[in-house]
Image (spheres, rainbow, N blue to C red):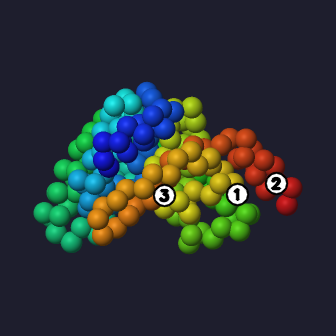
Amino acid sequence: MGEKTSRNTTSSLDFLLNKHILIDTCFLIKSYENAPFFKGLFSIFKNLNCVPVIHQLIEAEFVRGSKTNQFYQTKKQHLAIFDGFMLPVAKEIIDNSIAISMIYANKGYLNTQISIVDCVNAGILQKYLNNLFLITLDIQDYPLILFDRLKIIPIDAGRDVFTCGIYKFNNIKFNQCLIDFKKI
């Protein structure tokens, strides 16, 4: 991200000032694989005092498939930046995630389309509604029936361009979907 882009992006992300941002697994993987290109966005988060966070399921999804201990250790080392910023996945969040997964099914989203980790992310975002946002590359996994898409940020990584979406859980939409679900 060039200097001009960074300044423009920073001002358009002011809603993240003194908040937290949940890093989705896909974003975590690509930021690990393309670190120099994502550095500018992480600097913006730091300048806004916006703390990146993950939870245990994102950690597990990130390190799974490590073919060697060395690769696993390298990934674990990358996760050290989240030391102290690991959100717990409590029963309340699991209960929220189940309700969210039922709403998705009711609205025609297949279980194979939106993973359980995405549902847990949604449950966490619901619990920490006023202070937590999500950044993801899998924009189709966070449908606008429950979320507000606040910002799209392209990251030009040379041979690839990554489209990042920043989302906020919308409890009004959730409650309406829950009413719709209970009518059936």
Mark 3 is surrounded, within 10 Å at the Cα level, by few (under 14), some (14 to 19) or many (20 or more) other residues, namely some
Question: Mark 2: which secondary structure?
Answer: helix
Q: CA distance from mark 2 to mark 1?
A: 9 Å
Mark 1 belongs to which amino acid? Ile
CB within 8 Å, label 3 to label 2: no
Q: Residue at x 45, y 29 (%)?
A: 17
Whole-percent x, y for residue 104 in the image: 67, 61
Q: Residue at x 17, y 57 (%)?
A: 74
Mark 2 belongs to which amino acid? Asp
Which image quadrant is residue 106 in? bottom right
Circle number at residue 58: none
Of pointers 3 and 2, the one earlier in the residue sequence: 3
Q: CA distance from mark 3 to mark 1?
A: 15 Å
Question: Is residue 91 in view from this perspective?
Answer: no
Question: Mark 3: which secondary structure?
Answer: helix
Whole-percent x, y for residue 10 in the image: 41, 37
Mark 3 belongs to which amino acid? Val
Disc 1 marks which residue?
103
Q: Is residue 159 left or right of residue 154?
A: left
Whole-percent x, y for residue 73 in the image: 17, 57
Disc 3 marks which residue?
117
Q: Residue furthest left?
A: 70
CB within 8 Å, label 2 to label 1: no
Frontmost residue, 98 versus 6: 6
Of pointers 3 and 1, the one earlier in the residue sequence: 1
Of pointers 2 and 1, the one earlier in the residue sequence: 1
Q: Is residue 61 above or below residue 46?
A: below
Q: CA distance from mark 3 to mark 2?
A: 24 Å
Disc 2 marks which residue?
180
CB within 8 Å, label 3 to label 1: no
